[in-house]
Amino acid sequence: MCLALPALVVERLGQDGEDGDEAVVELGGVRKTVSLALVPQARAGDYVIVHVGHAIGLLDAAEAARTLALFAELQATAR
């Protein structure tokens, strides 16, 4: 089973002012760098689906909110 999570793109990383194929994303207060090679159109403020360090698709904000709410509900019931 694979799990991909929605994460907010906080910042695109690049060299000399040009956008690179990496970005800093945030999920649950945790920030990490992921590859945007599969979704080069992603920009700061977008939500992406992240799987093992790679953004694999874009997600609209409403769907990301619904998905994150479901994960929060699951976490609350697991305690």
Image (cartoon, rainbow, N blue to C red):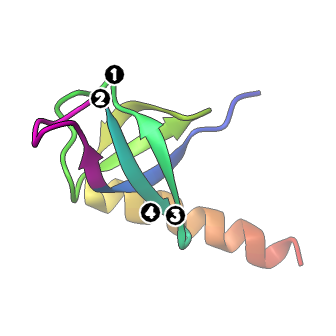
Residue marked by disc 2: 21
Could you tell me if the residues under marks 3 and 4 are in contact, i.e. CB atoms within 8 Å?
A: yes
Q: Residues within 10 Å of mark 1 (few under 14, many from 20)?
A: some
Label 4 or label 1, whichever lies nearer to me, is 1
- Does dot 2 land on a helix, a strand or a loop? loop
**Quarter the N terminus occupies:** top right
Q: Amino acid at mark 2?
A: Asp
| Closer to the camera in the image, 23 or 51 | 23
Question: Which is nearer the N-term, disc 3 or disc 2?
Answer: 2
Question: Which residue occupies 76% across, 78% down?
Answer: 76
Q: Which mark is residue 70?
A: none
Label 1 or label 3, whichever lies nearer to me, is 1
Residue marked by disc 4: 66
- Does dot 4 land on a helix, a strand or a loop? helix
Q: Position of residue 52 (x, y in %)?
A: 62, 32
- Does dot 1 land on a helix, a strand or a loop? loop
Residue marked by disc 1: 37
**Quarter the C terminus occupies:** bottom right
Where are the magenta residues, as a range?
11-21
Question: Which residue occupies 28% across, 27% down?
Answer: 39
Q: Which mark is residue 68?
A: 3
Q: CA distance from mark 3 to mark 2?
A: 25 Å
Q: CA distance from mark 4 to mark 1?
A: 26 Å
26, above or below 5, in the image: below
Q: Amino acid at mark 3?
A: Leu
Which residue is farthest front?
16
